[in-house]
Structure formats: C-alpha cells, structure tokens
Amino acid sequence: EIQVDPMKQDFFFYAKDRFDTARAQCEEECKQSSSQAGNKENELYRLTTLMNARLIQDWESGPASLREQYMKMEDDDRQRFMSEEEVASRHCATLTARKRSPKQQEYFRKSSNQCKEKFEW
C-alpha cells in the first residue's frame, strides 16, 4: 500500500529547526524555577508547555523575511504533495480510458459536421 506523508506547514519547518534550542532554553528555565524535585509527569507537561509557548511567541514576533523563508519550504512540500496526487489522477484516467470503436467515431464525426452546417452563416 502506498503511504503519502501529509503536507507540512511553514510553522512545522520552523519548529523542527528550532526544537533543540527551544528545548535547552526551556529545560534551563524549568531547572531554575523549581528547586524541589517534583513529579516527573508534571515536569514533562511544564517543559512541553514552555516549549510550545516559546516557539509560538518567537514565530509571531519574528521578521516577515523569516516567515517567507519557511513559506517557501511549505510551497515546496505542497508541490511534492500535488505531484503525487496528479500522478495518481493520471494513472486512474489511463486505467479507465476507453477507445471509441470505429462505428462510434464515424457517428460522432457525422453529428459534429451536421452541427457545424446548421450554425454556419
């Protein structure tokens, strides 16, 4: 079975590029703010929340040129996605296409000539 990865958006590429940096900063922030050893699940929840908030804030406050750079990556990915869909569409069209029999071709040629004769001035 053919598997197609879903199309990725500009923010996906941005977050992927900045993941390690954001994680390191947020881990440091978590360590500084909580001196006592807390529940591991709560720490993971807090880290994830801080990372999401930081990535979104940095994305929204970033310059337009940064967004354009990642929009280009999204467009490239969209082309990949569209190309696979187009290939599948063409494949289906070739499987279902049928040639007309000589009898049908003659009938359609005659009927189109009659229409032309009726509407010629």
Image: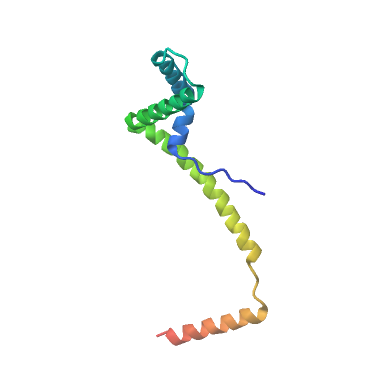
Along the line of sight, the residue nearer the viewer: 106 or 7: 7
Colouring scheme, one of rainbow, by chain, secondary structure, one colour: rainbow
x%, y% of residue 58? Answer: 36, 28
Along the line of sight, the residue nearer the viewer: 19 or 68: 19
Q: Is residue 76 above or below residue 43?
A: below
Q: How many marks do you count on the picture?
A: 0
Residue drawn at (50%, 41%) of the image: 77
x%, y% of residue 74? Answer: 46, 40
x%, y% of residue 62? Answer: 34, 29
Residue drawn at (59%, 58%) of the image: 90
* Res 32 → quadrant: top left
Q: Is residue 111 above or below residue 22?
A: below
Along the line of sight, the residue nearer the viewer: 24 or 79: 24
Residue drawn at (32%, 29%) of the image: 61
Q: Is residue 11 above or below residue 100?
A: above
Residue drawn at (55%, 54%) of the image: 86
Q: Is residue 101 above or below residue 38?
A: below
58 displayed left or right of 113: left
Name the image quarter holding the C terminus: bottom left
* Res 53 → quadrant: top left
